[in-house]
Image (cartoon, helix red, strand yellow):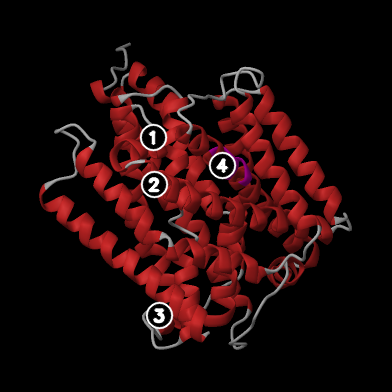
Amino acid sequence: MSQLVLPQWLSAGRLRRLAATLGPGLVVMLADTDAGSVLTAAQSGAQWGYRLLLLQFLIIPLLFIVQELTVRLALSTGKGYSELILQRFGRCWAQLSCAALVASCFGALLTEMSGLAGVGQLYGVPVWQSVALVAGLILLMVCSGSYRAVERVAMLFGVAELAFLYMAWQARPDLQHIRQQALDMPLHDASYLYLLAANLGSSVMPWTVFYQQSALIDKGLDLRDLRAARLDTMLGAVLCQLVTAAVLIAAAAVFAGHGGVVLDTVPELADAFGRVLGPLAGRLLFALALSGGALVATIVVCLSAAWALGEMRGTRHSLEQHPLQAPWFYGAFALLLLAAALTVVFSHSLVRLSIATAVLNAVLLPLVLGFLFWLARSELPAGLRLQGRYAVAVGILFLLTGGLGLYAGVTGALHG
């Protein structure tokens, strides 16, 4: 019997290296489909039907381009995003970038914790108990594991988000309505612009850029892993936006004929999705899917802030180090997590908080994309540097995206 011979590009060694490389891109994109993204997409579908659906697919190439540049920077320089900004632009700009990141991270954590507390309320669990349990488990996991262990747990949580794809299918969306509304974009309407900005800001976020760059370094990858890391990023970007689109489709189908619906709480959303699969199954699937994204995002957001703050201090840190070896790193992680937990315990959970946080991210897009563009132009080696026609195309895309996010966010906030 003849022996099966694999092509060179599909050799056992390459497959093992590919499997070892996959992770940072998928994790950061699963975190991107967090509680804020889910609540924003649900509100978009409930209020505007399918009029923001096309945007979800247009965001896929933008997401990939942004995160792929962080892959190049990480694997070629071995330095984190904050470290490169500090090196290239100086302490003042690095502090501004870090402040924007921390603001974005804290807003995201409030959203994640509020979403998880809302899920607990569905089953009669008091807010403080839900928040304390989540904070305690995440601290225990991070302090007792390595990066790879944390990554595996995060991916396990993220798998629950696939439930949204099933819910969209079961919602039986009307294809004629999708065709009619998908290209109908009322850009003159301030409330539409506000949600457009929120959808942009819940997809391209400062902490996704910081996280993936630092995660690749912490995982010990190098330029030999570039192709696999790009594939990892592309898979993550597609999956992220498919899940977000599924949430919007399900919400639009549920609220068809009830335009202008404003959702305020997680239980309201759960009840709405319960109409698709029945009260018990609908609530359970929604709770699992929302919790999965929120848990992944909580881990990613805290790590992003801790890594960035450490880079600002010139402190090298890693999840491979024991907490006693890197007290500042683990302390920053715990402080941010606990501050968000306490804030949620003593405040109310609203969908509007998630949307406002996403709009803040959209307003920050010019800063985030501007730094990323110039770092890719100046800090990469010749073979990987952003240059030529691709650089022009990326520059135009970043300029249009940043301008749209800033305009839509400010206009929607002022006139909505």
Labels 3 and 4: the sequence-earlier one: 3
State which tag comes first along the sequence, 4 or 2.
2
Residue 390 higher or lower than 281, as above or below: above
Other residues around mark 2 within 10 Å, as few (<14) / some (14–19) / many (≥20): few
Q: Residue at x 71, y 48 (%)?
A: 339
Where disc 1 sits, the SS reads helix
Instruction: Say what secondary structure mark 3 lies in.
Output: helix
User: Crowding at label 3, few (<14), some or many (≥20) Cα neighbours within 10 Å?
Assistant: few
Residue 232 falls inside the magenta stretch:
no
Q: Nearer the viewer, mark 1 or mark 4?
A: 1
Please provide the residue range marked out in magenta: 298-303
Query: Quick one: label 1 or label 4, which is nearer the N terminus?
Result: 1
Secondary structure of residue under mark 4 = helix
Q: Earlier in the sequence, mark 2 or mark 3?
A: 2
Q: Earlier in the sequence, mark 2 or mark 1?
A: 1
In the drawing, what numbered circle is on residue 83?
Answer: 1
Mark 1: few, some, or many residues within 10 Å (few <14, many ≥20)? many
The residue labelled by disc 4 is 300
Query: With 72 as the anchor, is 55 left or right in this view?
Result: right
Q: Nearer the viewer, residue 23 or 345?
A: 345
Q: CA distance from mark 2 to mark 1?
A: 13 Å
Of badges 3 and 4, nearer the viewer stands: 4
